[in-house]
Image (tube, helix red, strand yellow):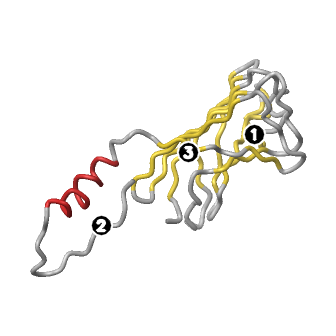
Amino acid sequence: MTFAPRTWVVGEVVSAALMNQEIRDQFNSMFAGWTAYNPTWTSSGTAPVLNNGTLTGRYMKIGRTVICHINLISGSSTTYGTGTYSFSLPAQAANAGAALVSACQLLGTARWAGETVISANANTTTPFMSTSATDARLLGLTATVPETLASGAQLRMTVVYEAAS
């Protein structure tokens, strides 16, 4: 991953090792593969339980910019709990003074477009979906909004945000 560049001093001898670390390695990190992480799925009510479902995450961090993708596929023994869902991020969000909005979609019995919200200093993102096919208002994703979740339902979220550090 990229890191803060070195401060050079007058008269310093620049070695190949320093050039590799300060230039080559930073440049290469911007083209490296994404890093996998294990997001957690929480709720404002009773906790959901993944059981035989899958929840994966991966991200790329360049400087303080984080690009993150989270994918949830519910299984036959997944339980959905109650309340609005949230998913952990790979890095805490900066205190940008505003919420950041990115895209998500739910593939259940229908395909639902939505948004995710990351608040200032947050460690989680919350998906919001339309309340019905005819009502474009957004509510936090729950076991029954926008539809009753069942085995095989897939939630895909991609977020871009500024990390705290």
Q: CA distance from mark 2 to mark 3?
A: 26 Å
Q: Can you say whether 159 is above or below 18 in the image?
A: above
Q: Earlier in the sequence, mark 2 or mark 3?
A: 2
Residue beneath label 2, please? Answer: 5
Please report contact status of discs 2 and 3: CB closer than 8 Å, yes or no. Answer: no
Residue beneath label 1, please? Answer: 137
Q: Can you say whether 155 is above or below 152 in the image?
A: below
Considering the numbered disc 1 on the image, is that residue within a helix, a strand or a loop? strand
Q: Can you say whether 43 is above or below 70 in the image?
A: below
- Residue found farthest to the bottom: 10
Q: Residue at x 72, y 41 (%)?
A: 128
Q: Return the x and y of residue 33 as percentages of the image width and height.
A: 40, 39
Q: Can you say whether 96 is above or below 51 in the image?
A: below
Q: Return the x and y of residue 20 as percentages of the image width and height.
A: 21, 56
Residue beneath label 3, please? Answer: 159
Identified by mark 2, the residue type is Pro
Considering the numbered disc 3 on the image, is that residue within a helix, a strand or a loop? strand
Q: Residue at x 62, y 63 (%)?
A: 120
Identified by mark 3, the residue type is Val
Q: Return the x and y of residue 10 as percentages of the image width and height.
A: 12, 81
Q: CA distance from mark 2 to mark 1?
A: 45 Å
Report the side of 62 relative to 111 (left or right): left
Front residue (pair 47, 110): 47
Q: Earlier in the sequence, mark 3 or mark 1?
A: 1
Identified by mark 1, the residue type is Arg
Report the side of 87 relative to 100 (left or right): right
Report the side of 55 relative to 148 (left or right): left
